Image (cartoon, helix red, strand yellow):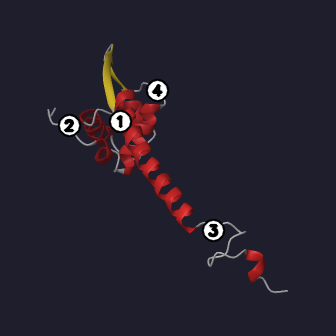
Amino acid sequence: MSTTAVDAWHALADPTRRRVFARVARGPCSVTEIARGLPVSRPAVSQHLRVLLEARLVDVHRQGREHLYRPRPEGLDQLRQELETYWNQTMTAFKNLAEQTYQPADSAPDGGSADEHRTS
């Protein structure tokens, strides 16, 4: 296994890998269990799991003869924190835009009241 960590976003960019990760997120499982629900071979699932391991999104533990994979909460936490940063930036930008374009109904642009500019 490589000692260089793979970016978690890059690891989850592949749709099949996201499906592998979704299965692991439901609970500890083996390569065989994961492959059973996917249209890819066990060796392909193993390759996807290797990338997820390098991205620190999953851990593997030996139980008897099987290797069981499960999610690493701290790997997901890093992704969640990044998403929250983007979300907060977007909401701040939206708030600023809304405040810049909002004019109360009782004030007209020239300083008079809105009622003075209405026609019957």
Q: Residue at x 48, y 53 (%)?
A: 92
| Count of numbered tags | 4
Name the quadrant of the N terminus: top left
How far across and down, in percent of the image, does residue 58 sit?
33, 30
Q: Residue at x 27, y 33 (%)?
A: 53
Of residues 52 and 81, the one nearer the viewer is 81
How far across and down, in percent of the image, does residue 55 sit?
27, 37
Q: Which residue is identified by label 1?
A: 78
Distance in Å between CA atoms under marks 2 and 3: 51 Å
Question: First in sequence: mark 2 or mark 4?
Answer: 2
Numbered disc 2: secondary structure: loop
Q: Are marks 1 and 4 in contact (CB under 8 Å)?
A: no
Disc number lying in front (1 or 4): 1
Residue 77 visible? The answer is: yes
Q: Residues within 10 Å of mark 3 (few under 14, many from 20)?
A: few
Quarter occupied by residue 57: top left
Q: Which residue is identified by label 3?
A: 103
Residue type at mark 3 is: Gln
Q: Are marks 1 and 2 in contact (CB under 8 Å)?
A: no
Numbered disc 4: secondary structure: loop
Question: First in sequence: mark 1 or mark 4?
Answer: 4
Distance in Å between CA atoms under marks 1 and 3: 40 Å
Question: First in sequence: mark 2 or mark 3?
Answer: 2
Distance in Å between CA atoms under marks 1 and 2: 14 Å
Q: Which residue is identified by label 2?
A: 5
Numbered disc 3: secondary structure: loop
The extreme right residue here reads 120
Question: First in sequence: mark 1 or mark 3?
Answer: 1
Q: Residues within 10 Å of mark 4 (few under 14, many from 20)?
A: few
